[in-house]
Amino acid sequence: MVRSCFAYQYEKIVEKKKLKIGILVVAYNAATTLASVLDRIPSEFKSEIDEVIVSDDFSQDSTYLVGLGYQQESDLPLTLIRQPKNLGYGGNQKAGYKLAIEHDLDIVVLLHGDGQYAPECLPSMVAPIVDGQADAVFGSRMMVKGNARKGGMPLYKYVGNKILSKFENGVLGTSLTEFHSGYRAYRVDSLKKVRFQDNTNDFNFDTQIIIQFFDAGMRIKEIPIPTYYGDEICYVDGIGYAAAVTKDVLAYRLQKAGFGMSSRVSVGEEYELKESPNTSHGRILSILASRAKGRVLDIGCSSGLLGEKLSDCGHSVVGVDTVEIDGVRERLGNFVLADLNQGIPSAVGKNYDYVVAADVLEHLNKPDNILSDIHRVLDENGSLFVSVPNFSHWYPRFRVLFGAFGYDRRGILDEGHIRFFTRRSIRRMLEGSKFEISNSEVTGLPIEVFGIDGAIGKFGRLVESVLLSFWPTMFGYQFLFELRPVVDTE
């Protein structure tokens, strides 16, 4: 049944630069199965393993005692832990991955103590990472047609797995054959780059970490694994689990669109570039691509993605932000680290032809102060581009109307926003800061992040354009202004 797991030869692993391989065995009430799971680790592979971490999640049976006995008699490099309280399936993984990081492991494989996943497949699970082909490897019971049912997967679980996986692929834009296998191998360096610690402690942890890896652009590879269902007790509430993973993928997609179903999925802090021509960033890029090439100051530049696009248009770009994100100095001509709440530092210089403050003012304690500083560094014939989210959009209006106001991870109610603007209030502040508005626009919802394109996307844009012309303050997602400095004549 498990012979197909040996797609990679052991020699292939040995030939590569030695990586520290760890096995994380999550166990809960696994007294009757834990020893057999450890026994089934291929003897030829044991020399490749640097550590086997068995994490007993405060079992109510003798799982920990079985582990102690095994530790005394086995030649496996076994680290045995008993959690002081039940952390949950996701919480137990978090604790294990934290140890893998602390112990300087290069690869960690998630194995279940109940025997549901074949330890015989361990060489195949780690080989794509060793070969440099993947950041994560998922064992899939669905890759080989018919194998899941032959292995004893109940029909209702098979159907549910297929439906959920198809739905998740459709929403996320992925192509995994299975989202719900608990057999995983991760490159530890990749784990460090995602905020898995913020994820749920429940069973949908596995879905959330897929979302994080997908969002971070990590390489995920699937390999076929056998299916085994025995007498193990299932602790998963199927309906609750389905609802949780559905919420997770929808919340992620809504967050990317700028809305905020509350979710515990924490993706990267890098501010996302909105490249669609219908968004504020897209419009700024389009406008400046047609203007004379000049010096640009990008305020709140994040990782420099917008500035890099402007540089590609021939402009010379300097970025300034409160935090320095990896890669920003390579993308921009210059980068200045500064607390924007304290103003624009003199190190950025003066006489800029263009200043871009895209989605920045809403994050500042006193945005009118930064506007005064912009007036100082902008050439008297230069242009300032400002975009802010529209608080009078139907989404925050409805949230307030139904008493459900709160912050989201992205969008109009982004948890980092400390100032909110309507069209009237932002115009009043801009004009009160010695700028005159030379052009203003309203942009719509960036529907492309939903994966809506083609004919449906064009129809959606058509409907949105009608709504925007009919009631811009209700359906406008962002306000975009081009401004010129008012020069004192005295």
Image (spheres, grey):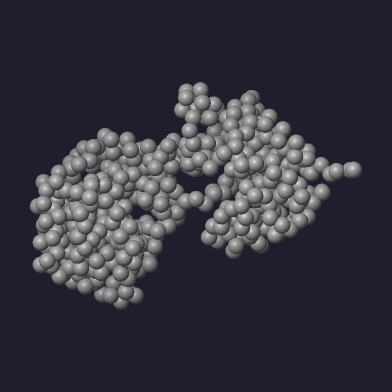
The residue lying at 68 percent from left, 55 percent from top is 345
Decide if residue 73 is on the left or right side of residue 348: left
Task: Tell me if residue 125 comes above or below residue 377 in the rendering.
Answer: below
The residue nearer to you, when weighing 227 against 414, is 414
Task: Tell me if residue 217 comes above or below residue 461 in the rendering.
Answer: below
The residue lying at 23 percent from left, 37 percent from top is 237
The residue nearer to you, when weighing 430 against 438, is 430
Decide if residue 88 is on the left or right side of residue 474: left
Where residue 287 appears, as percent x and y from the top left, is 70, 46
**Which quarter of the picture shows residue 429?**
top right
The residue nearer to you, when weighing 362 against 155, is 362
The residue nearer to you, when weighing 455 against 308, is 308
Residue placed furthest toward the top: 401
Task: Tell me if residue 252 comes above or below residue 17 in the rendering.
Answer: above
Task: Tell me if residue 368 comes above or below residue 95 in the rendering.
Answer: above
Where residue 100 appears, as percent x and y from the top left, is 31, 61
Decide if residue 374 is on the left or right side of residue 177: right
In the picture, which quadrant includes the C terminus? top right
Q: Is residue 277 visible?
A: no
Where residue 253 appears, as percent x and y from the top left, is 45, 41
Q: How many marks?
A: 0
**Which quarter of the picture shows residue 7?**
bottom left
The residue lying at 32 percent from left, 48 percent from top is 206
Where residue 217 appears, as percent x and y from the top left, is 45, 55
